[in-house]
Image: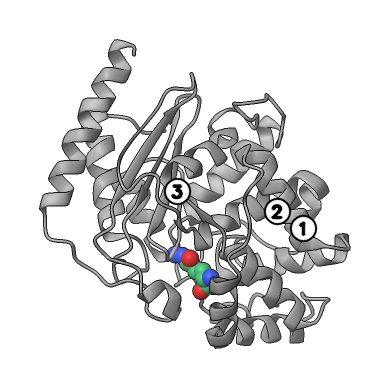
Amino acid sequence: MHKKEQEYFEIIENIFKLVKAEENLGETANYIPELAKVNGEKFGVSLLFLDGLQFGFGDCDEKFSIQSISKVLLLALVYSEIGEEIWKRVDVEPSGTPFNSLLQLESDKGIPRNPFINAGALVICDILIDRCKNPKQHFLDFMKKVSGNSTIQFSERIAENELATGFRNAALTNFIKSLGNINNSPEEVLDLYTHICSIELSCKELCTTFTFLANGGKNLFDNKQILSTSQTKRVNAIMQTCGFYDESGEFAFRVGLPGKSGVGGGIVAVMPKHYVVSVWSPKLNPKGNSYRGMKFLEEFTTATEDSIF
Ligand code: DON
């Protein structure tokens, strides 16, 4: 291990212990029963440097539901295939609203503010359905390509559970369809969307899966170009401005790295050209982002003085 990497190891170890010793506030996501059941005391972190060195602490090898973090991978897949056309269907502006809000859609004529709110990801699912015979398999193949892990599968248990209770996403899909920005049946769109959200990865696997976004669009393990450098910049820019919904400004302000959260309690963030860092702690703050995850990353970039700014 290089001196710098040794320093990071010690910083992360200390902050992990510090955050773990503090009171763990928040609640696990309660609107998806399968997520509400998860032990709120789970806590894992991992960091992967682009030279291949990786370390992890706590529950860093345990798989959890990555939920909305998948929206970045969905965007990367469709963006890599249709390029700038995608922005005719979804915008790139922060919404300043919760992830499942219906509010702006009517005045925005069915064009979601960005790909990371539910409305935006539902529209991108619709594009994927239009483009391929088996969109679920196509997404899984992409997941396998970016993670280097051929065993990745959907969690049917979580997908079914969310489908049975996802009345708000059903409302969003029907509303966007009524405004003309969804072509396929709401059932098909919701089925694909809930499957994409159901993927389970550990903190360590999450880091590996996101390395292409820290590495100019290229996988680390096989050098496959997933996105161009310009596309990579754009996806990272949207993570920076929209990755935490109405807490995106706060995350940029406190942490200073592009990142994405999910209601399973995971957060992944990238320091372009250097590393990917991930955290999992299932209790969420009132904005739906991991309480300890936010805390850990804030302390981490404060100690390392890293930021993209
Ligand atoms: O659509 C939903 O409600 C979930 N499948 C995903 C939401 C989510 O992860 C938002 N992230 N913070």
Q: Earlier in the sequence, mark 2 or mark 3?
A: 2
Task: Name which residue type carries label 1.
Answer: Gln
Q: Specify the color scheme.
A: one colour
Marks 2 and 3, how far apart at CA: 17 Å
- Residue 258 in the image, given as x and y percentages of width and height: 46, 43
Residue 65, relative to residue 168: is it above or below? above
Q: Position of residue 44 (x, y in %)?
A: 32, 47
Q: CB atoms at circles 2 and 1 under 8 Å apart?
A: yes
Residue drawn where x is 55% and y is 83% of the image: 166
* Element on which disc 3 rests: loop
What crowding class fits label 1: few (fewer than 14 Cα within 10 Å), some (14-19), or many (20 or more)? few
Residue at 40 percent across and 51 percent down: it is: 62
- The numbered dot on residue 202 is 3
Q: Quadrant of residue 156?
A: bottom right
Of pointers 1 and 3, the one earlier in the residue sequence: 1
Quarter of the rendering occupied by the N terminus: top left
Residue appearing at x 60%, y 81% in the figure: 163
Check disc 1 and report the residue beneath it: 137
Give neighbour class at mark 3: few <14, some 14-19, many 20+ (Cα, 10 Å). many
Q: Residues within 10 Å of mark 2 (few under 14, many from 20)?
A: some
Badge 2 amino acid: Leu
Image check: 302 left or right of 110? left
Checking the image for residue 79, the label placed there is none
Query: Alpha carbon of mark 1 to alpha carbon of mark 3: how far?
Result: 21 Å
Residue that mark 2 sits on: 140
Q: For the C terminus, give its image quadrant.
A: top left
Task: Determine whether 218 is above or below 62 in the image.
Answer: above
Q: Position of residue 217 (x, y in %)?
A: 64, 32
Residue 55 higher or lower than 70, as above or below: above
Q: Give amino acid for label 3.
A: Ser
Left/right placement of residue 41 relative to residue 78 reads left
